[in-house]
Amino acid sequence: MKPVAGLPLLVALALFSAGVSAASGTVTHLSGTLSVKKADGSVRILSQKSKIENGDTLSTERDSFAQVEFADGARLTLKPNTAVTIERFDYSQDRPQDDYFFYTLVKGGVRAVAGVVGERSGERYRLRTAAATIGMRGLVASDASAADGAVRVGPGDGRARDFGTVSVDDCATTRGGDCARLDAAVFVAVADGEVVVRNPQGELGLSAGQSGVIAPNQRPLFLSTDPGLQFTPPATFIQSIMTGSVVNAGKSLECIVSR
């Protein structure tokens, strides 16, 4: 059999392409400790610029904040004592039919800014929590495609601007800290866009500046006042986001956690 010319190059390109598609996001800002549990059960301590893959469960420690940015521009900022599993992220600029962004808030709280997937394929952007599934409603997404227990958020005036910004705190699973004084429920606060909260018990619409509560097996309710769940990263973390610098700078690298 004759050797195939250029075969090593083709193999290298294939491996490179596979590596690119496997990466879902990147840790862009970090203050404190962020770890990842891989699908194979291994655990690593992450650093700034670490790559995030489908199946990863990210966890922040006490007093730690982390921000992850995805290829479509979506951003997740994790509060302290938070765990999030990236179930599936798929995005290609020219293939909206392949869009997916599914992730689970295992515990704690996140601030989510939707990206292109949330704008153009809102029915395939979902954040699963203990009490509901939360989805960013795209500019052209159909409400008829929303599953029970979904929260849809997006620009309500049809203009092409921020796709939607929402804070979600799971006080149904996590009872410490600010959650200790609140009911066992999931709290949603909308900073930009419109939100429709759906579950089998009912439906609730929220606009920018409004908050809602979703108790397990109960209809969503409007909150007349802000529940007071704090989102106060340290000044160094905020400064790193504003200036593009790195809080955990220097020679901080990933390391494997052995037991």
Image (cartoon, rainbow, N blue to C red):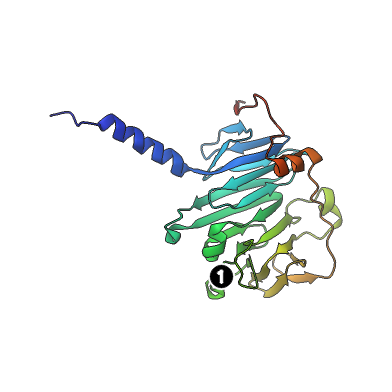
Up/down of 174 relative to 14, above or below: below
Residue 141, placed above or below residue 65: below
> Which residue does the numbered mark 1 point to in the structure image?
146
Disc 1: CA contacts within 10 A as few (<14), some (14-19) or many (>=20): many
Residue 41: % across, % down: 55, 36
Q: Residue at x 65, y 55 (%)?
A: 113
- The residue type indicated by label 1 comes to Ala
| 93 and 153: which is toward the camera | 93
- Please, which residue is most extreme toward the left here? 1
Work out which residue is located at the far front of the displayed protein and give it: 243
Quadrant in the picture for the N terminus: top left
**Placement of the C terminus among the 4 image quadrants:** top right
Residue drawn at point x = 57 percent, y = 66 percent: 138
**Is residue 219 visible in the rendered structure shown here?**
no
Quarter of the image where one finds residue 251: top right
- Furthest toward the top, the residue is 251
Residue 24 in the image: state x and y as whole percent.
52, 45
Residue drawn where x is 65% and y is 26% of the image: 252
